[in-house]
Structures are given as structure tokens and as C-alpha cells.
Amino acid sequence: MREIYYAEVPTPDTHRVKVWLQQEFDPGWGHKTVTPTGIRLGLTGESTPSTTDNPRISETAASLPAALVLFIWSVQRTTYLKVFRWTKRPFPEESLIIGRLTTQIQAHFPQQYPAPPEVDLSQQSIFEALAPHYPQTVRYFQKMPNGEYDLNRVYWWEQRWREGVRHPQQPKQVVFSAGESTTSLQAPDYDLIYIGGALGVLHAAVMARLGYRVLLVERLPFGRMNREWNISRQEFQNLIDLGLLTPAEFEGVIAHEYLDGFHKFFDANNPPQAKAPVLHTPTVLNIALNAEKLLRLCGEKLREAGGQIWDQTEFTRVEIGSDRATVFAQFLPSQAPRQATARLVVDAMGTASAIAWQLNGGRTFDSVCPTVGAVIADGFEPGVWDRRYGDVLNSHGDISRGRQLIWELFPGEDTELTIYLFHYHQVHPENPGSLLEMYEDFFTILPEYRRCNAEDLVWKKPTFGYIPGHFSHNSRDRQVAFDRLIAIGDAASLQSPLVFTGFGSLVRNLGRLTHLLDTALRHDLLDKSHLNQIRAYQSNVAVTWLFSKGMMVPTGQFIPPQRINAMLNTFFGILASESPTVAESFIKDRTDWLTFNRMALKAAWHNPALLWWIWQLAGPSDLWRWLGSYLNFTLLAFLGGVCSQWLPRWIGQIQPWVEPRYPGLWFWLLSQSYALTYGTGIPCPYMSSLKPLLEKDSELHAENLTII
């Protein structure tokens, strides 16, 4: 037998597909015979042997009559169909039949992008409202502590995200100009107000320890997290270097450290050149943090340094004046209004930030990873998973209903496992991406991914969120600041293409961001032209957005089910053939220009079809955008190679003379030095030890505040 066709029928109702195939599909040629899992097409009047539709049945003789076998199966809450030919010689009108099959499948089973129902919680609970639409999701959230509260959060997050995607041209206005009317002889209440307490508290605690007056505003009870965090020791060292945590405190927030991490994509249906071995990355995301413990510790550091936390307080708007920003909020338990003033407001609210949406007007995010999962306390049978290892990126099937689903699994404290399911997604008004649909997938297909009975699992808490991506031509094509307001973390779309979210990007660049922000505050360089230079942009990361694009199924389109797995296996196979250092550097966003080009050429040589596949998925418009990113990367890599060894030292030498006289020039030189080093993946010898530098800055802090 020979496989001649493979397609996905994007519906979980496999029985309906079988009935359609057996009763309604019109092949236009041949005699249709019903089989247990599909149909067989033979020539009219010609007998054919019986079959069990097993595709491994060997071709026994050249005299077998010509026939096509069409059969279906279900996995990942969708349906797949294959067509096999009995003999070597083509079936009459074979290409015509396949063409009719493709057309009729797509007409009868189009891609569907269901939206959650409208919910009135005054009339019914979230469980009652969603049970008819997402029965498995409701079933397992009911088994979780605080499940009703958390499911409300999932629903709220999805509705907030959908609203922003569908109406990007009219984002809700939350940032207003107050003009000169706010000028006052009285100093602002704070130097910094952070809105958002997850990523926000990390940076807020660092700035408070530098001597700034800091307020943190958080919508949830402080310390609650709907995601877990994984990182490596090398990345986390940045927080230690900045003096935020001691090595002993870092060890205290480690939930688990595993020996190795695996990357493997399903390749059963791939061509030989698109199959790959397991990629091992023992020092990528191998530290599972107790995120809530880390947040509480940073909260204590913030308070010890004189900072304040307003939790259960929802931001409503901010008014920007000439010498201050006024934040308006509401204390949720009593609905009482709150307000405070600061020299600078920092938006750390993540993807749902109304500030971030307004900041970029009609330009929404270019991609997003809808991510769901759970922390599972216990219940897996012995042998299902070895806790010494993590599953960094894994797929156990092909494209499912317009998405290539990818799993992550990280061991946590005691017997806990944190498991995520996500996919890379094109942001589209008709198809924003659904957390609730993903949760229905998660609970249904988890037993397919890891052998388990979901009923036996002990569910500790859900983990979920939208992880945004923005494809940048250069460091200036996305705004991250208004006057006296700047965005960080996911609100600034700091996501790398493979495994790091806003948390990883923020931690890796925290020293850079802190040094620049401290400099801007000390010299009152708080207009948007200066603040827009404070960002974690990396040209070597921007150029890899093509990997994200290659993992997205364009809305409304059908592509071969194995296509994305084939692309991923091609490139990860190349990484597996490289040294561990090269693979780690690429996945940790530290790859340089020469390595990037060498691996890209190697992948194209190994699998020439990769170029055509990328063209089909990205199209000429996005490839043109990527070319701009690549040329920018090339230019900065060249300049970085020329300047990285002497420029940081030189600006360090001229700092005592330039900074007091020309603070704007000093700030620009500092930002350019970072752009040519950290921004291209080059370690910076002068700036590698930021702790002493920032301690020196903090000694000058009180004096500078009185001048400002």
C-alpha cells in the first residue's frame, strides 16, 4: 500500500465525519464500499479483497485490483483522514478524486473559531454558564481549590483580550493629558508607581532598594499568580547581581531543579529529512521557582526599602501632567476610589494592559501564545514521568483545528508537576485565540500526552495567560512610553520566539533596564523620547520571529497537518547536531550573527523545502518585514563587533565629565552601548557587574532628588 493523501478534518466529532464520508461524499469516480473506519473506492464491477483498513497491510501481488482506502481516526480533539492506494499503479482519476475530497472536506468542515458565551454572574455561577460549552473545563475546575474564582479569571482574561483584538482602532482611553494644571510646589507622593504586581514587584523592589519612593498597585490579592516560572541559574544571577536576593534566598525559592530538558516534536508523518532526535538542553528552564514565594519575598524587600503595596486595587486611568503623573484606581473590596501621584508610572499589567493597547493605537500584537495548564499535586502512576527531567517543548500530534499544540512539563515541589499547553497564534479579529477552548483541549487530551487518568489527579491550581509577541524591524518601531509613563514585561511585548515569556526577558535584561531607568530618573529625563530608549529590545531576538511565524496556522487556511512539526524538527535537528553551547545560546536568545546564519544555511541545505514552506506561511509581506529585521541585526552585529570591546569602557571613563554637564548625551551613549552589546547577544565587560555601579548611583540618589 502507498499513502497518497493526509489531511485534518477540523472537528472533534469523528462520528459525524465518518457518516459524511460514507453517505454524502461524492468521489465522482469508482464504486464506494463502507468499511468500519471509512470507505473503499474500487472500480465498478471489479471485486476487491476484504480489509480491516490497517495501513500496514502489505501489497501481496501486482494483480490486486486498483482501489483506494479512505480511513479516519481521532486524536487531540480533532479528526484525521488518510488515503492509501492498494497497488503501485494509479487509481483511475486519482488526482480528481483527491481534489474533490479536499474541496468537499473544507466546504463541509470549515475552520471554526467559537467564542465564549456572554455570562451574567448575577443570574448564574460561572460553572453553570460554561458547563454546556466547556464541560471538561468546568468539571476539573470544580476539583481545584478556588476553582470558581480562577475560572472567572480565565473568562475575564479572555474577554479582555478579545475586546482589545477586535477593536484595536478604538482602544479604551486610560491615559489622559492633564496639561499644566497639575504643576504644584508639593512634590509627588512617589517617584515610581508600578501597576501590576507580578513582574512589577521584581523591578519595583530593585528600584526601592536604590532609594526611590515606590508604590505597587495590584488588582489581585498580592502574591497570587496564574502562572509558574522556570528559569536557569545563569538568568537568575541577574537578580543576585542587582542585590535584590542573596544566593541563599535564591536557593530558598527553588521548587525543583532537574538534570535535563527535552525538545521533541511529533514526526511520524514527516518526510525523512524532517525527522529529528531529541534535543537535550540541561540548563534551559531547569530551575522551577516557587513563584508565589518569590513574589512574597520581593514584596518584603519592597516594604523594607520603604515601598508600599496597594493590592486588590484596580487601575482605572492615569493623567499625565508637566511634572507628575496621577494614577486613579479603585479598592475592590469597598469600591472606594484611590489616587496617588508619581514622577513616573510603570505599566507592568501584561497583555491585558489597557495602557499598552492605547500606547500603540491601532497596531495590535503580531502574535500571541494562548497558554493554559495546571499545577498537579499528585496522582500520576509510577513511571509516567521521571522527576529528574523536564519536557521543554513537545508535541504529540499534528495540527489540530488550526493550531499546532505544544506541551511543556516541569517538575515542582515534592510530587508536583506543572504542565502547560500552548500554541503560536496569529492575532486576528475573527480568531483572537481562546483560553477556554485550550482548556477543553488540555483536560481532554492530557491522557494522550502523559499516560494518566485525569480523574485520579490532584489538581492544585490552574496556570494560564496570553503571552504576546511583537515583530520589530528595529528598536524604534514600537512605542513603550508616553511622557512620564513606561511599559515593561509582557505589556511591552517582551517575548522571545521559543521558550521565554516576559518574565525571562525581563530578568535577563533587568540590569540594563534598571541602569537606564535610574539614570533617567536622576536627571529627570522622563519625556517619551528618552523613556522609549529604555527597553529590552534585542536585534538577535527580533530576527528569529520567523520561527514564531512558522509555527502559526493562518486564520481560515488549511495546511498539511504535519507541516509545522516538519519545520520544527528540521531546525531542532540542526540544533541537536550542534554543540550543547550553541543550542543553549540560541534558545536563551544569545546567538550571534555568524551562528544564526550558519544554522539557517545548514537547515536550508538539509531540507530545501523549508524555504517554500516558510514562504507559504509568512507570505511576501512578512518576509519583507523580516528582511528589515535581518538587515538591522546585521548592521548592529557589525557595529557591536567593532565597538563592544572599547565603547563601554570609554563611556565609563568619560562619565564623570559628561554626565553632570550633558545628561541627555550621557543617557543616549549609555543606551547605545547597551544596544550594541546586550541588544545583539554580546556580553559587555564593563556592564557585567551592575551591582557596584548601581550602588554607586544610589549614593548620589538623595542629592540628585533634591536638585530635581
Image (cartoon, grey):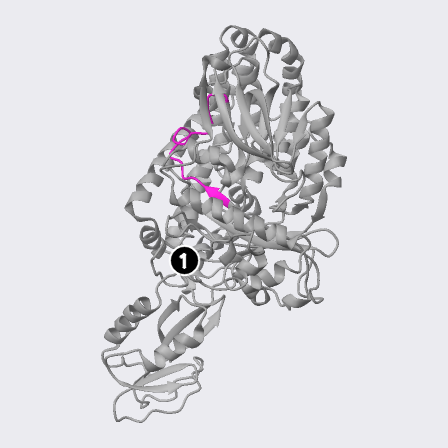
Q: Quadrant of the N terminus?
A: bottom left
Q: Which residues are magenta?
A: 467-484
Relative to 131, residue 50 above or below: below
* The one of 263 and 516 positioned closer to us in this rendering: 516
Q: Amino acid at mark 1?
A: Tyr
Q: Quadrant of the C terminus?
A: top right
Indicate the position of residue 327 as horizontal and vertical percent values.
Answer: 55, 26
- The rendered magenta stretch, by its main secondary structure, is classed as loop
* The one of 457 and 594 positioned closer to us in this rendering: 457
Indicate the position of residue 124 as horizontal and vertical percent values.
Answer: 56, 56
**Total number of numbered discs in the rendering:** 1
On screen, residue 306 versus residue 656, left or right, reads right
- Examine the structure image and report whether residue 287 is included in the region drawn in magenta: no
Identify the secondary structure beneath mark 1.
loop
Indicate the position of residue 23 as horizontal and vertical percent values.
Answer: 33, 82
Relative to 245, residue 181 above or below: above
Residue 419 seen by the camera: no
- Examine the structure image and report whether residue 473 is included in the region drawn in magenta: yes
Q: Quadrant of residue 457?
A: bottom right
Relative to 85, residue 221 above or below: above
